[in-house]
Amino acid sequence: MTTRRALDGKVYFSYEDIHDAVSSSVARVKAFKPDVIVAIGGGGFIPARMLRTEVKVPIVAVGLELYDDNTNTINENGVQIKQWFSTDYGPGALVENGRVLIVDEVDDTRTTLAACVSELRKRHKPSQVGCLVVHNKLKAKRASLPSDVTYIACEEVPDEWNCYPWDAAAYGLTARAHTKRACACRGGAPVVVIAAAVGALAALLRR
């Protein structure tokens, strides 16, 4: 998918963009044959739910935090585990000796994914682990995944500042305003060109 930066230098993705990207990975996910999905919160929650509709496997959630929400900087002590699931009952019980697919929205530095895989294997004994991300940023990574981990990237994207629809309020936008920016980034005239055209039209009307 071709995208363009908005006037603020960021790239906006709509729910439709995410849904299409996730759907494009379904054949690869089915080939992996997961027993359970582990959604990394908060960015992995919605992509995991979209995926579940098509692959029909249950979801458990973990909370991992690389960035401090208050300062928007990387935590000094690395990835912090804020939430984990129980294997005593429900879908969590499927993790032991099961095929586990970890889902997150973006693979930026790979630090969070690597930490999740490591923690999963330390706490449990899955038979196979896979990772799915909606977007893999084309950049050097700070961490790596074990060679036996299946890796699925729905889309490869440049190293830009990505804005996802579930974070619209964090950028001071409504859901509709976010979608409009995403549509402009996705196709048609670039946002810069649209703004220039509107400015030129306004100047003509003032004459």
Image (cartoon, grey):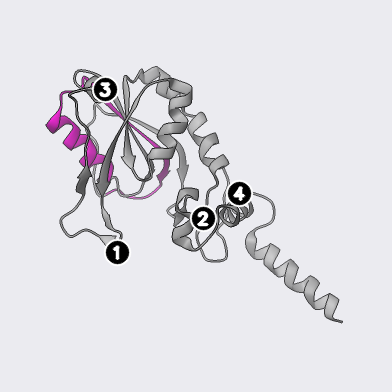
Amino acid at the residue labelled 1: Asn
Q: CA distance from mark 3 to mark 1?
A: 34 Å
Picture residue at 25% right of the left edge, 45% below the top:
64
Name the residue carrying label 1: 70
Instruction: Count the labels in the image.
Output: 4
Mark nearest the camera among 4 and 3 is 3
The numbered disc on residue 122 is none
The numbered disc on residue 186 is 4
The boundaries of the magenta stretch are: 112-141
- Residue 125 in percent (x, y) is at 15, 23
Amino acid at the residue labelled 4: Arg
Name the residue carrying label 3: 90
Do residues under tags 3 and 1 come within 8 Å of each other at their CB atoms? Answer: no
Amino acid at the residue labelled 3: Gly
Query: Which element type, helix, strand or loop, lies under badge 2?
Result: strand
Mark nearest the camera among 3 and 1 is 3
Q: Is residue 191 left or right of residue 101?
A: right
> Which quarter of the picture shows residue 48?
top left
Choose between 80 and 157: the one closer to the eye.
80
Q: CA distance from mark 3 to mark 2?
A: 38 Å
- Residue 178 is covered by the magenta coloring: no
Query: Which element type, helix, strand or loop, lies under badge 1?
Result: loop
Q: Residues within 10 Å of mark 3 (few under 14, many from 20)?
A: few
Q: CA distance from mark 1 to mark 4?
A: 30 Å
Q: CA distance from mark 1 to mark 2?
A: 22 Å
Amino acid at the residue labelled 2: Val
Q: If you read the primary sequence from the N terminus, does the residue marked by circle 3 or circle 2 appear first?
A: 2
